[in-house]
Image (tube, rainbow, N blue to C red):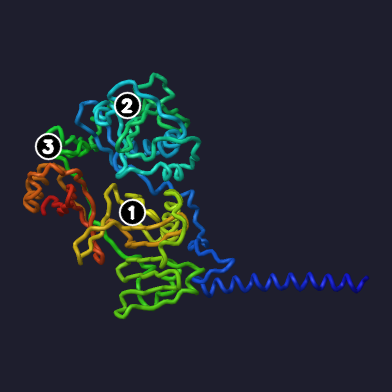
C-alpha cells in the first residue's frame, strides 16, 4: 500500500514537471519566434509591456478647434485663444460633465423652428464649441468613461452651442448639439466644479471688452455666393496675431547612427521585441529596418517612422473606440519623444476592415503639417490604421518643437490675403464660390528644422498654401 502511494506521488510529480517544461518551451518559443503562433503567444499585444496609464491621458487627444462667443449681433463672433482662461474653463466643463450628460440623457424635443436650424441658433447669444471634424460618439464615450445606457440617434458630435439664458433654472444649461446634419437639444445640470450660469452669461455680455479677442465675421454675410455658412474671417484692417517661428528637430534620443541603435530599439520597439526582431541598415545609411515574420518597422534619418503589420486583414474590425484605443496606445508608448506640442485627433475614416485615424501636432491652436518635397503634398503628422485587435499601419513624423529665436506680427485681415496673395498666386480662385475653409497652420519640410506660418485656403477641388508675410517682410 505504501509503495502504491509513493508511485502515485511520483506520477503526479512527473506530470507537473512535463507541464512546467511545456510552458517554459512556449515562453522561449514565443520570444525567439514572435511571428509563429503558439498557445501562449499574444501577437495582438504589441505593447503589452507598456507602463502607460491610458485612462489618465486619453482625454488629451481631443480638443475643440474653436470656441467662439456670439453676442447675438448675427454675423459677429469672438474667437477665444486656446490659452485663454475662458477657453480652458469651458472645455473643462465639457470634459468633466457636459459630454457625459449628453451621452447619458435623451434629447429634449424642440418646439420652435429655429431649434432645428443650426445657423439660426448660432446667430443668437450663445457660446459655440466646434471640433475640426465630427467625432464619433463611441470615441467620446470611451474618453469620458461613460458607458451606454440606451440607444441614441446621436452618432457623432461636431458642434455644440451653449445657451445659458434659455432655462430659468440656475442649476441648468441648455445645449444644442449639431452632428453635421441634425440638431439635438439637451438640458444639462450644472454640477459642482462647473462654471456657474452667471459666468457664461457674463462672458457673452462682456466679450467685446476683451482686447485680446479678435472679432470675426461670417463671410456669407458679405459674400452671399460663398456656399460655406461656417466660414468666418477677420474684416478688421488692424487685426494681427503674434506668431513664433518654430525650431523643429528629430529627437536626440533617436538620432539615426550605428552607435545609437540600442536607444532607437528601446524607444521604438520596447524590451519584448528588440531582441527578437532582425535589424538591417539601408544601403545609404539613411534608414534602419526592424522585422520579423509579422511586422516591419522602418525608421528614417529625418524622424519618419513607417510601421506595417504584414497581414492587414487579420483581426476583428471591432468598434471605432476599440481601434482608437489601439492607436492611442501606439502613440503613448513613444509619446515621451515628442516635446512642445499637443497631439490631437483630426479625423476618423471607417474602412471595410479597419479605421484610419489622423493626428496633428498642435501648438498655440495652430496645426503643424509636414511638407513632402518630392510631390509637394502637405501631410498630417501621424496616420494610423487600426482595428479592434491591433495597429496595422503607421506613418509618423517624430519631431520635437520649440519657439525659435524669431517672431513677427501677421495680418489677419481677410481682404489682405484674398486680394494681395491668393488671387496673385491662385488666380483661378478669384471667382470661386466653393471656398469652405480658411485657416492658419505651420508647415515644415520632412527634413527641415524650421516651421513657418501659412494661410490654407480649401476649396472643393484643391488646397492653396500661402506663406504668411509679417511686418517688414
329 w.r.t. 13: above or below: above
Q: In the image shown, does 465 or 349 lie closer to the viewer?
A: 349
Q: Position of residue 181 (x, y in %)?
A: 30, 36
Verify CB contact (< 8 Å) between mark 2 and mark 3.
Answer: no
Taking the image as shown, residue 279 lies to the left or right of residue 11, namely left
Q: In the image shown, does 241 or 73 lie closer to the viewer?
A: 73
Dot 2: within a 10 Å radius of its alpha carbon, few (fewer than 14), some, or many (20 or more) residues? few
Q: Earlier in the sequence, mark 1 or mark 3?
A: 3
| Residue at 37 percent of width and 58 percent of height | 384
Of the residues tagged 2 and 1, which is closer to the observer?
1
Q: Position of residue 305 (x, y in %)?
A: 35, 66
The secondary element bearing badge 2 is classed as: helix
The CA span between labels 1 and 3 is 32 Å
Displayed quadrant of residue 226: top left
The CA span between labels 2 and 3 is 35 Å
The secondary element bearing badge 1 is classed as: strand
Q: Which residue is mark 1?
A: 358
Displayed quadrant of residue 361: bottom left
Residue 51 in sight from this viewpoint:
yes
390 w.r.t. 59: above or below: below
Q: How many marks?
A: 3
The secondary element bearing badge 3 is classed as: loop
Quadrant of the drawing holding the N terminus:
bottom right
The CA span between labels 2 and 1 is 37 Å
Verify CB contact (< 8 Å) between mark 2 and mark 1.
Answer: no
Of the residues tagged 2 and 3, which is closer to the observer?
3
Q: Earlier in the sequence, mark 2 or mark 1?
A: 2
| Residue at 32 percent of width and 42 percent of height | 131
Q: Of all residues shown, which one is farthest toward the top?
A: 168
Taking the image as shown, residue 256 lies to the left or right of residue 35, namely left
Tag shown at residue 202: 2
| Residue at 19 percent of width and 31 percent of height | 75
Amino acid at each position: 500500500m505504501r509503495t502504491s502511494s509513493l508511485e502515485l506521488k511520483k506520477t503526479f510529480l512527473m506530470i507537473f514537471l512535463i507541464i512546467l517544461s511545456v510552458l517554459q518551451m512556449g515562453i522561449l518559443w514565443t520570444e525567439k519566434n514572435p511571428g509563429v503562433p503558439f498557445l501562449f503567444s499574444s501577437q495582438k499585444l504589441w505593447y503589452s509591456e507598456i507602463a502607460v496609464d491610458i485612462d489618465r491621458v486619453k482625454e488629451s487627444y481631443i480638443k475643440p478647434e474653436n470656441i467662439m462667443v456670439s453676442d447675438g449681433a448675427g454675423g459677429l463672433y469672438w474667437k477665444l485663444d486656446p490659452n485663454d482662461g475662458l477657453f480652458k474653463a469651458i472645455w473643462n466643463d465639457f470634459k468633466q460633465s457636459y459630454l457625459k450628460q449628453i451621452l447619458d440623457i435623451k434629447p429634449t424635443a424642440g418646439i420652435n423652428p429655429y431649434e432645428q436650424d443650426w445657423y439660426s441658433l448660432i446667430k443668437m447669444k450663445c457660446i459655440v464649441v466646434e471640433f475640426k471634424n465630427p467625432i464619433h460618439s463611441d470615441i467620446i464615450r470611451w474618453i469620458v468613461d461613460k458607458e451606454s445606457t440606451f440607444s441614441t440617434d446621436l452618432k457623432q458630435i461636431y458642434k455644440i452651442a451653449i445657451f445659458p439664458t434659455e432655462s430659468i433654472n440656475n442649476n441648468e444649461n441648455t445645449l444644442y448639439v449639431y452632428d453635421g446634419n441634425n440638431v439635438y437639444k439637451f438640458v444639462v445640470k450644472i454640477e459642482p466644479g462647473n462654471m456657474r450660469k452667471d459666468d457664461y452669461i457674463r462672458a457673452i455680455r462682456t466679450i467685446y471688452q476683451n482686447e485680446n479677442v479678435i472679432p470675426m465675421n461670417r463671410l456669407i454675410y458679405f459674400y452671399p455666393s460663398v456656399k460655406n455658412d461656417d466660414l468666418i474671417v477677420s474684416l478688421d484692417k488692424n487685426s494681427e496675431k503674434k506668431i513664433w517661428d518654430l525650431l523643429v528637430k528629430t529627437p536626440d534620443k533617436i538620432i539615426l547612427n550605428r552607435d545609437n541603435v540600442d536607444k532607437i530599439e528601446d524607444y521604438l520597439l520596447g524590451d519584448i521585441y528588440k531582441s527578437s526582431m532582425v535589424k538591417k541598415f539601408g544601403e545609404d545609411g539613411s534608414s534602419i529596418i526592424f522585422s520579423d515574420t509579422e511586422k516591419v518597422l522602418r525608421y528614417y534619418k529625418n524622424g519618419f517612422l513607417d510601421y506595417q503589420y504584414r497581414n492587414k486583414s487579420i483581426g476583428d474590425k471591432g468598434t471605432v473606440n476599440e481601434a482608437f484605443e489601439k492607436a492611442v496606445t501606439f502613440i503613448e508608448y513613444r509619446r515621451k519623444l515628442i516635446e512642445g506640442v499637443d497631439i490631437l485627433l483630426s479625423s476618423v475614416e471607417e474602412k471595410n476592415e479597419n479605421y484610419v485615424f489622423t493626428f496633428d501636432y498642435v501648438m498655440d491652436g495652430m496645426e503643424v503639417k509636414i511638407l513632402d518635397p518630392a510631390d509637394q503634398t502637405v501631410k498630417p503628422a501621424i496616420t494610423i490604421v487600426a482595428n479592434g485587435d491591433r495597429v496595422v499601419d503607421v506613418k509618423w513624423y517624430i519631431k520635437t518643437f520649440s519657439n525659435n529665436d524669431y517672431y513677427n506680427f501677421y495680418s489677419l485681415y481677410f481682404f489682405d490675403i484674398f486680394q494681395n496673395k491668393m488671387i496673385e498666386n491662385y488666380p483661378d480662385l478669384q471667382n470661386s464660390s466653393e471656398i469652405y475653409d480658411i485657416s492658419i497652420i505651420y508647415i515644415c519640410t520632412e527634413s527641415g528644422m524650421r516651421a513657418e506660418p501659412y494661410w490654407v485656403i480649401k476649396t472643393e477641388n484643391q488646397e492653396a498654401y500661402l506663406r504668411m508675410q509679417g511686418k517688414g517682410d
